[in-house]
Image (tube, rainbow, N blue to C red):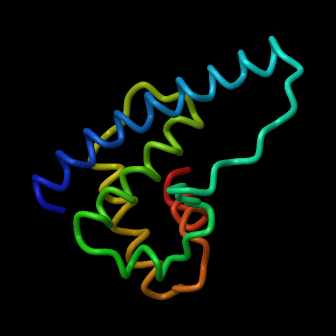
Amino acid sequence: MSKMTRTLLSAAVAMSSLMLVSNVHAEASKNETTNEAAKPPATDGVIHIKTYLCKDVMRMSGDERDLTLSFMHGYFLGKKAATEYVVGTLGKASDNFIEYCLDHPNDVALESMEKFLK
């Protein structure tokens, strides 16, 4: 993994993690204070990361793939409410994910990444 990729990964993971944690807490507060019915998700411009297959991520260009991997790392860090991480560990998880996806193109990408971040 190049130095630039590690830098992008660090920045994107930090941003994604912080944004996800903020959104989770904001949504929890909203649900606790109102009985408003759940609204359907927006359909314009929404990316449903849970529907990506490994082959979808593998077909992405370098920068797009790096940002998607960074988003996935941030997603899992946010789920854990992590405020710190080791860049090398995330880089190794990305490398393992890519190798796995090359052999398992029809697996769900997010579920596949989770295997390497436990």
Snapshot quadrant of residue 68: bottom left
Q: At x 32% / y 66%, what residue is drawn?
A: 65
Residue most toward the top?
A: 33
Residue 89 horizontal/vertical position (percent)? 34, 49
Left or right: residue 116 compared with residue 61? right
Left or right: residue 21 compared with residue 61? right
Snapshot quadrant of residue 69: bottom left
For the residue pair 26 and 12, the one nearer the viewer reads as 26
For the residue pair 98 and 20, the one nearer the viewer reads as 20
Residue 52 horizontal/vertical position (percent)? 55, 70
Q: At x 19% / y 50%, what residue is drawn?
A: 6
Would you place residue 20 above or below residue 54 in this image?
A: above
For the N terminus, the image quarter is: bottom left
Left or right: residue 42 compared with residue 70? right
For the residue pair 72 and 97, the one nearer the viewer reads as 72
Would you place residue 69 above or below residue 25 in this image?
A: below
The mark total stands at 0
Left or right: residue 39 compared with residue 87? right
Would you place residue 47 above or below residue 74 in this image?
A: below
Q: At x 34% / y 34%, what residue is drawn?
A: 14
Snapshot quadrant of residue 43: bottom right
Residue 36 horizontal/vertical position (percent)? 85, 25
Q: At x 50% / y 52%, what residue is drawn?
A: 117
For the residue pair 72 and 49, the one nearer the viewer reads as 49
Residue most toward the front?
A: 44
Residue most toward the left?
A: 3
